[in-house]
Image: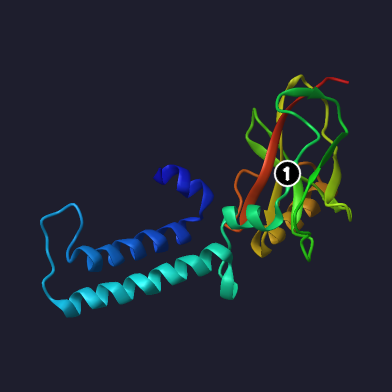
């Protein structure tokens, strides 16, 4: 269960919510749950309650990205509601690949991008921004190099400010030299949806 939650919430949010819940339970059970440790002092229990409320509040703020705190993946998925509808998993496709889908809320800035991951090297390649239409649908085109009848996973992801700096560097290297894949992203990179296709040889 913890592993599942950690995929939905960033580490900061998860830690705040767990610690806040633990402190609140100390107040409710007048001790540490599942142990024989009891806390008789009412003052100590009130301190635990106050700390629990503060940590839970910070966890909620972190989850929704209030006051500049980075939002969680789950919150971003709920906010934008972006889904891929044009391709089923593991179908064959030729480059360029047109992705289409639905959305609930259009981002105010250029925050949502399509990416390709080479599943053999596990490297990511940033592609295009999404084009949002008034009827709550979006589309974009993904161009991939030579086909090899091997799987590629296409992602729709949210780019925070740190990730956008990395993207700018990636684009500059790509334009001036060659395609170089990305192995890891900053913590404000959030995958909103994905689909795996089999890239056909031309």
Q: Is 171 situated left or right of 45 in this image?
A: right
Tell me the residue at 57%/76% (across/down).
Answer: 67
In the picture shown, does residue 172 fall above or below 197? below
Question: In the displayed structure, does residue 46 sit left or right of residue 106?
Answer: left
Q: How many marks?
A: 1
- On the image, the x and y values in percent for residue 172 come to 80, 54
Q: Residue at x 62, y 35 (%)?
A: 122
* Residue for point 51% across, 55% down: 10
Asked if residue 36 can be seen in this view, the reply is yes
Residue 108, x across and y down, in percent: 78, 66
Q: Which residue lies under the disc numbered 1? A: 83
Q: Residue 144: which quarter of the image?
A: top right
From the top left corner, tell me how far across and down residue 94 is, in percent. 86, 26
Answer above or below: position of 68 versus 190: below
Q: Nearer the viewer, residue 114 or 73?
A: 73
Q: What quarter of the picture does the N terminus occupy?
A: top left
Provide residue 198's location: percent of width, then percent of height: 75, 23
Q: Is residue 122 above or below residue 148?
A: below
Q: Depth check: give the residue in front, 57 or 69.
A: 57
Q: Note whether residue 176 is visible.
A: no
State which quarter of the image contains the C terminus.
top right
| Viewer-nearest residue: 17 or 11 | 17
In-image side of 25 versus 107 (left or right): left
Determine the residue positioned at 64% across, 54% down: 78
């Amino acid at each position: 269960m913890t592993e599942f939650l950690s995929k939905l919430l960033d580490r900061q949010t998860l830690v705040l919510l767990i610690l806040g819940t633990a402190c609140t339970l100390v107040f409710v059970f007048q001790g540490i749950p599942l142990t024989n440790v009891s806390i008789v002092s009412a003052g100590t229990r009130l301190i635990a309650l106050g700390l629990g409320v503060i940590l839970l509040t910070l966890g909620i703020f972190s989850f929704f990205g209030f006051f500049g705190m980075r939002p969680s993946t789950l919150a971003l998925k709920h906010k934008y509601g972006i889904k891929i509808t044009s391709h089923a998993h593991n179908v064959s496709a030729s480059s360029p690949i047109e992705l289409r889908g639905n959305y609930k809320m259009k981002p105010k800035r250029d925050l949502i991008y399509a990416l390709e991951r080479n599943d053999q090297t596990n490297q990511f390649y940033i592609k295009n921004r999404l084009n949002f239409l008034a009827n709550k649908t979006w589309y974009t085109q993904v161009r991939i190099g030579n086909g090899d009848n091997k799987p590629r996973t296409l992602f729709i992801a949210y780019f925070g400010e740190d990730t956008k700096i990395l993207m700018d560097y990636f684009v500059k290297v790509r334009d001036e030299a060659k395609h170089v894949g990305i192995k890891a992203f900053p913590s404000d990179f959030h995958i909103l949806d994905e689909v795996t296709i089999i890239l056909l040889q031309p």
